[in-house]
Image (cartoon, rainbow, N blue to C red):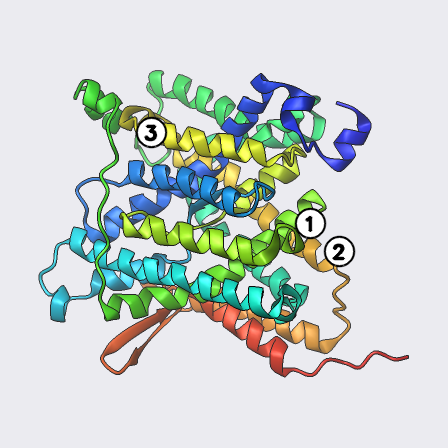
Amino acid sequence: MSEEVTKVGIRDAVKELGWPKTLLLGFQHMFAMFGATILVPILLASFFGLKEVPVQVTLFFAGINTLFFHFCTKFKVPAFLGSSFAYLGGFTSVAALNSGIYAGLSGEDKLAYACGGIVVAGSLYLVLAAIVKAVGMKRVIRYLPPVVTGPIIILIGLSLAPSAVQSASTNWYLAGTALAIIVVCNIWGKGMIKILPILLGVVGSYSIALICHFSGLKNPDGNAILDFSLASQYAAQGISGFISIPKFTIAKFDLQSIMIMAPIAIATIIELIGNISSISATVGKNLFEDPGLERELMGDGIASSISGMFGGPPCTTYGENTSVLELSKVYDAKVVRIAACYAIILSFSPVVAQLIGSVPKCIIGGVSFILYGMISAIGIRNLVENHVDFTDSRNLIIAALILVTGLGFKFWNVQGGECIDGITFSLGSTDITLTALALASIVGVVANAILPEKKKEE
């Protein structure tokens, strides 16, 4: 790898590295998204009391949505679309509904109605895409300058930080091992070792976890380090356990669930813009102009609607994979599409999906220390590279409002271990939930619009 390539980043992985190394890079991207992506269906299963965790459906749509997004964006944006955490507050609200048509409904039916709300939420992206197409990207994006998108990117990373600590705390030794391997490989590694720190961190710490597990060691809380029970159950089913079609669920529609889920799109649209800004800063290209913000909105919105229509979670561009781009310096979107193909293949194999899902939470937590932290760091870089002037009190106020709203409304009531994400209010007979990220996004946009800018001196 030449010094010049190292500085600007690899644009054509196959040409520079060859197919074997490119396939490995795709595997690394898959591992980066895997923990967070499958965590969403695991949480949904607990919210709705599902008998079976819809991991296969989630992986299938993660891959399909990513490929569709790349198609919409002319294959130019190296983004991976994984499960969105922003809608979890909405899912919990729908799961808690117990009046009207929701009285006595099974968890599966309630989830179907929540997915109907996701379909409508995805259509809101198309409305904004049409506006961008009609009035121009610059007129729309001026309401989302770096002083708004930067703090929101920072907020995305900070809001995920507690989950990294919580996961790592199940076994700090293995979490620290994964973290140490990643740091050593990225700082002192050469060649492919420097490009594959996340994959090496997962594989290295998982190998140690295997040794500890079969040596009879356990986590500090007394639980087994590894759990192969689900993989064993599927393996016992024979061929159907190794190869099977994901179990799709057709969405259902009701105004109450739509009003709970759809407003969250306000936050995820801004999250998308923030993530595209991060990717642009990482790869050194203005992806808002080429392929165009309207294409990115269309790709993400339609992908979420398609996923929701068949029982999959909503999707969003993943900051974890942007962090991998930053660490590996390989910016070829083809590598991300390879990861998407891996996800689709895994979705047809319950055993393999569960084996990869057996990576302990502590290892995912150790990896997340880097990935989530880098999301916030990219937000800071976004502010620095766009020369946001924080000697201007206007900019300080906007950033402060975004950060305090996004963090405060997510953790303002933690007595007894309770954590509330956002606020819920009634509009007529309908309850509407706005997550903390949605609130912060609205506050940032409104504050930027109404606070007067300091006039530039001649």
Image quarter (top left, top right, bottom left or bottom right) of the N terminus:
top right
Dot 2 surroundings within 10 Å: few (below 14), some, or many (20 or more)? few
Instruction: Indicate left or right for 51 with 217 as reference.
Output: left
Measuring 29% from the left and 79% from the top, which residue is drawn there?
426
Which residue is most to the right? 458
**Labels 1 and 3: the sequence-earlier one:** 1
- Where residue 156 appears, x then y in whole percent? 52, 56
Label 3 element class? helix
Q: Secondary structure at mark 2?
A: helix
Marks 2 and 3, Cα distance to the nearest angstrom? 40 Å
Name the quarter where the C terminus is drawn: bottom right
| Residue at mark 2 | 385
Q: Are marks 2 and 1 in contact (CB under 8 Å)?
A: yes
List the residue tagged with mark 1: 281
Q: Quadrant of residue 383?
A: bottom right
For the residue marked with disc 1, what is the amino acid?
Ala
| Quadrant in the picture for residue 256 | bottom left
Who comes first in sequence, dot 2 or dot 3? 3
Residue beneath the point at 40% across and 39% down: 64
Q: Hey, what amino acid is under mark 3?
A: Ala
Q: Which residue is mark 3?
A: 353
